[in-house]
Image (cartoon, rainbow, N blue to C red):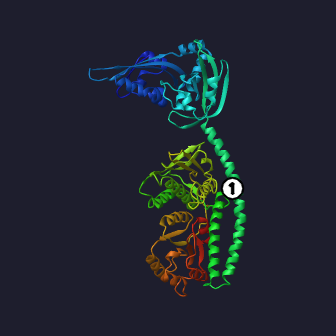
Amino acid sequence: MISIINDRLEYEHVNEAFCRNLKTDKSEMVGKSPSRLWGDETYRDKIKDNIRRSLNGEEVQYRAYFDISGEGGRFYEVTYRPFRSDRKKVNFAVVETRDVSSEIDDRLEDAGKEEKYLFMEKFLPFGIFSCDRDSVVIDANHAFYNITELESGKSNRLSDLFSVDQRFISFINSAKHGEAGTFGQLQMKTGKDQELFTRISCYIRKSDDGEVIVDGILEDTTREVIMERRLYQSHRLETLGTLAGGVAHDFNTILTTISGYSDMALSEVEINSSVYKYIMRLKSAVDKAENIINQMLVFSKRFDQQLVDLEIEDVLSEAVDFLSSSIPENINLEADIKPVNRSVNADPTQLFRVFLNIMTNALHAMKDQGGTLSVCCKKSVIDNREFADVVIGDTGSGIDISIIDRIFEPFFTTKDVDKGTGMGLAVAHGIITGIGGEIDVASAPGKGSVFTVRIPLQHKNNDTSSAGPQKNKNILFVHSNMHLSRTLSQALEKMGYSVSLLSSQTDIESILKSKPGEYDILFISIDFVNEEISRHLTEPGTRDRDLNVVLILPVEGNGDNDRLIYFKKSGFNIIREPLNLRDIIKII
């Protein structure tokens, strides 16, 4: 069968044998692309590149299996020869197509099982190899080189790959003719120094020259090992979470008792007395203990996240912007935050907390030698489920393999005693798994770490009517941390509220005076309450009586105790940082 293809990649001519064998007509083919006959996929994978090579002056010959629509599949031997219509350049590719199906069938029949095994060796995803007594690879299939990342044609020793786990190497060094061995979950390093787990089955034979030969099959079981580890870690963390949740609940009851009696004692002592100061310090310690208890409850998932549909790239951008101002000069930030064009169902405050915690840990890992903090957002598909992946990587000190399985345990930390509580990653794990996500970690000492926060994407046209209370209230939010304010406001606006953000005392005073009755709720950090604002909010006749005031206190300490008591008597609600959407919704 002869056909001629021009430099426009169209049939210029086809002979009668071509039309007869392929059951087509010359008028249907001339001037048409080969994809019309062979199909787009076959044309793209088996034909197009060979035509281009021929038009560039190269003669190409190969055999391949072609599936012709309605006719079943056939084996063809195809030869492309360049042809010049003038002396300057190649204008045509002359294509000779020969049906070799019968020849292939005869060969398969004559070869029997041997040919089938060759086919299996070529296409199955198992590494098939032969090596000598010194573990030098004599022969191997393509899959073997893909798995081990070795270069074909070079002298490769398996002993160089299995330096950690010597079981297989010890076997081939001592085994006798006729012995077989199976080794599961062998830890190895690939030719590119990547950690890998494999399963090997092998047989010892003698060559015609009497040399010992090891024939083996190698299977990559890394994903299987990772899934087993993940399942084991999940069970262990679930057990720890149950324990932590029970302890936190009991301690919370005790702390509530201590806090209650402290408040009662405060009402019976003089404000200026030393006993009053002692009790206030006691309350401050209770507040710190409650903060730790709350983190334990987050880890054990015994808390309710206020889930709303949000764009994950918005929260990630807020976290990156918030952190960028505090990044040391010896650390470079590379952010590639692209929209995934789908929402996730999460608590924006808690999500912000997760990203900030992981990025802060990354900065800490690079504080001495410097490096690069990389942040990106992308979409992934696993087991037919779509996820938003936030990947945070660093080039810092890395995590030793002996402790990497423990980093999500509560109170586990490699930092000094006064540098951290070890609850950061535990809390992050509780938040993400609580919304059906997961956190993956890849790390090696001296090579940095990569954390992948994976969160399920929402289905399109998802009904979010039950995400939260849909009430038309106007909220004025006053806080110095505009990044946190914007994150919270986005969540509240998705729930039907109207939110205005301020960070200037002058603007606050102006709004309170000129726009009475415009806002229903005022959230304001105590740092912004100067004498003028305090007078307007507390003195009769000046404050809008319908305006509810929520005072935001810092993480530690109560500020001026006399002022705080005065504000409570004035009917202010009090909340303490760190702020979360759940507490804000309760107040609203």
Q: For this view, does 586 lie left or right of residue 246?
A: left
Q: Which residue ends up furthest to the left in the rendered image?
A: 87
Numbered marks: total: 1
Residue 234 position, x and y percent, is: 66, 49
SS category of the residue bearing label 1: helix
**Residue closest to the far bottom:** 541
- The residue that disc 1 covers is 241
Q: Is residue 296 left or right of residue 341?
A: right
Kind of residue at badge 1: Gly
- At which x and y percent is residue 284? 62, 72
Q: Quadrant of the C terminus?
A: bottom right
Quarter of the image that includes the N terminus: top left
Q: Nearer the viewer, residue 484 or 394?
A: 394
* Res 10 seen here: no
Whole-percent x and y of residue 498?
Answer: 52, 69
Residue 517 visible in the current orientation: yes
Residue sitting nearer the eye, 232 or 26: 232
